[in-house]
Amino acid sequence: MSHPKEERTLVLVKPDGVKRGLIGEILSRFEKRGLKVIALKMSWPTKEYIAKHYLGEDDWLEMIGEKNRIAFEKQGLDLKEKMGTTDHKEIGRKVKGWLEEYITSGPVVAMIIQGMHAISTVRKITGHTYPIESAPGTIRGDFSVDTPIAANIEKRAVRNLIHASGDEKEAAHEIKHWFGPEEIHSYKRSDEDVMF
């Protein structure tokens, strides 16, 4: 990693965020925190394009399945009854399919955010993956109430407004997938010298 203030992450405003007119509010939250947008575009991705966004590796699928198991346990619900299986990878594949449908249901706004520990900072601003678990003051905590239980019962993705890369590996993959080098811009914000 280079200097922490040069860290980059990918953010997607998902179709529900675009359709609800939250693009400006979301951008504003990152900029007010001292982060900068170094690439920005709107597109309506295809399922083939989105399939390459989500890594779909065994670890990722396993993690998605485990998150769902925990959510179901917290609610005292039977995972097998609702999902048809308890196999984490199989659940992860189902959720990945629903995510692909969700992200291709309308236009998305893709951006690269750069700044001090951008990956973890953006994820804090964004809030927990499940809006119902997100703290007030976060994007998801202020603008969404969806739950994995409701989504899984309805066989759809959680409508959580926004995607933010989870770690450096994910960020590198997603940035390369969404943006070419010529679309990424380097500049200095006027407040950088006083912020860090």
Image (cartoon, rainbow, N blue to C red):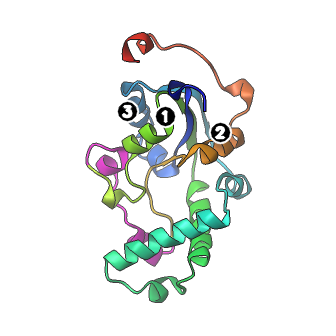
- As helix, strand or loop, the secondary structure at mark 3 comes to helix
Residue found 42% across the figure and 31% down from its top: 30
- As helix, strand or loop, the secondary structure at mark 1 comes to helix
Residue found 63% across the figure and 46% down from its top: 169
Q: Distance between the residues labelled 2 and 1?
A: 13 Å
Q: Distance between the residues labelled 3 and 2?
A: 20 Å
Q: Quadrant of the N terminus?
A: top right
Q: Provide the residue span drawn in magenta.
A: 136-155
Residue at the spot of label 1: 118
Residue at the spot of label 3: 29
Question: Total marks drawn?
Answer: 3
Q: In which quarter of the image is the C terminus?
A: top left
Residue at the spot of label 2: 175
Earlier sequence position, callout 2 versus callout 1: 1
- In percent of width and height, residue 11 lies at 53, 41
**In the picture shown, does residue 79 fall above or below 93?**
below
**In the picture shown, does residue 169 fall above or below 194?**
below
3 vs 1, front mark:
1
- In percent of width and height, residue 150 lies at 39, 72
